[in-house]
Every structure is written in structure tokens, then in C-alpha cells.
Image (spheres, rainbow, N blue to C red):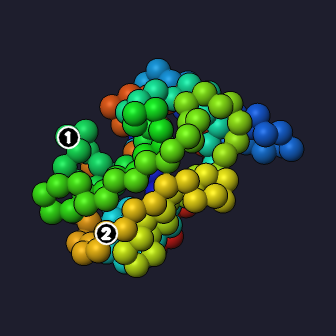
Amino acid sequence: DGFKATVGGDPTIKASPLGYGKSAIFFDGTNDDLELADHDDWDIGSGDYTVEFWVNDISVADNDGFLGTQDSNGYSGWLIRRASGELNFNQWGSSAVEVNVSASGSGIGSSKTWRHIAVVRHGNFYKLYIDGKNNGSVEDSSPSTLTNSSSGLTIGAYTGFANMYMDEIRIVK
């Protein structure tokens, strides 16, 4: 399926700093984001999944989001963002945070280099990878079904707006 994005601000497709004739989505950090309407494809549910993307972080502050379905109240969905100076993934169960994984020493914020980010759920284990290396994990011995969000999928923002390039965003269930 093709999905139409609602554009906030002026994110643009630009030549990638990676070069090689590639392009990427550029968010200037002011009010740029992309929003895709609520859809079952964004609800990662209770099975195994991988959410991955490439990012070149120019200036990403705490609570700037990379992507997710969590509403700004934080009571449903999932979110990949910067929190407490680190890359963070969280997902909500029926009434509280079900899973919260942070990368230690990730350097996310202003590295100005391309990095591959992946969040992987396999069974009861949730792992956060940066450039193919496990950089944070947690086990949930009794995982519940993720509470679906009606907010849709937001790319490039949460409660703040990130200054970055993003490319090759995938959600695999």
C-alpha cells in the first residue's frame, strides 16, 4: 500500500550527506514532521517485529522523536526518541510502560554521521541496535499486547523537532 503523509513544516528531500547520489528526508529542527494516518501497519502488536531506519543526527535534543505512534500524552503506542541523552525505545501496554530500552553511550544527538538504528523484538527480548551492535536490551517475562494508538505514525518529531536526515524507514512484523 502507498500511504499519503501529512506534512508539518517543510521537511524536504535533499541530497544525502552520505553522498553517492542518494537522497534522504531532511528535517530542519523547527517544526518539521511527517504524519501518516492511523493504520494497522503501524500497530506492532504482541509478536516479533523490527523497526529500523538510517539517521544522520545533526541536532537532536531530549524528547525529539525519530518515529513512533505514541501520542503526546504518552499513554499508547510506541516511540523511538532521544531521552536522557540516549537513544530510547518504549512501548505501552494496557495502562503503563510495558517496555523501556535505552542505549548506553549511544552519542545520539549531534554525531553528524550516518547510523543504522534498529529495534528488534524476538520473543520476550527487546534489543536496540546501533550500526549492528546490540546497544541496549531488556527482557519482559510476561509481555502483553501493545496498546494501539489512534495517533498514526509520526516521523521526525515527538514533543520536540529533530534536526536530522532520515532514510530507509522500515517496520517489519
**Residue that carries the numbered disc 1 in the rendered image:** 73
Q: Nearer the viewer, mark 1 or mark 2?
A: 2
- Residue 158 is tagged as none
Identify the residue at horizontal 37%, vertical 75% (top origin). 124
Q: Classify 10 Å Cα crowding around label 2: few (below 14), some (14-19), many (20 and above).
A: few
**Residue that carries the numbered disc 2 in the rendered image:** 140
Q: Are marks 1 and 2 in contact (CB under 8 Å)?
A: no
Could you tell me the amino acid type at mark 1? Asn
**First in sequence: mark 1 vs mark 2:** 1
Looking at the rendered structure, the secondary structure element under dot 1 is loop
Quadrant of the image occupied by residue 134? bottom right
Identify the residue at horizontal 46%, vertical 32% (top origin). 85
Residue 4: % across, % down: 46, 51
Q: Is residue 76 left or right of residue 162?
A: left
Alpha carbon distance from label 1 to label 2 = 23 Å
Identify the residue at horizontal 68%, vertical 30% (top origin). 112
Q: Is residue 158 left or right of residue 113?
A: left
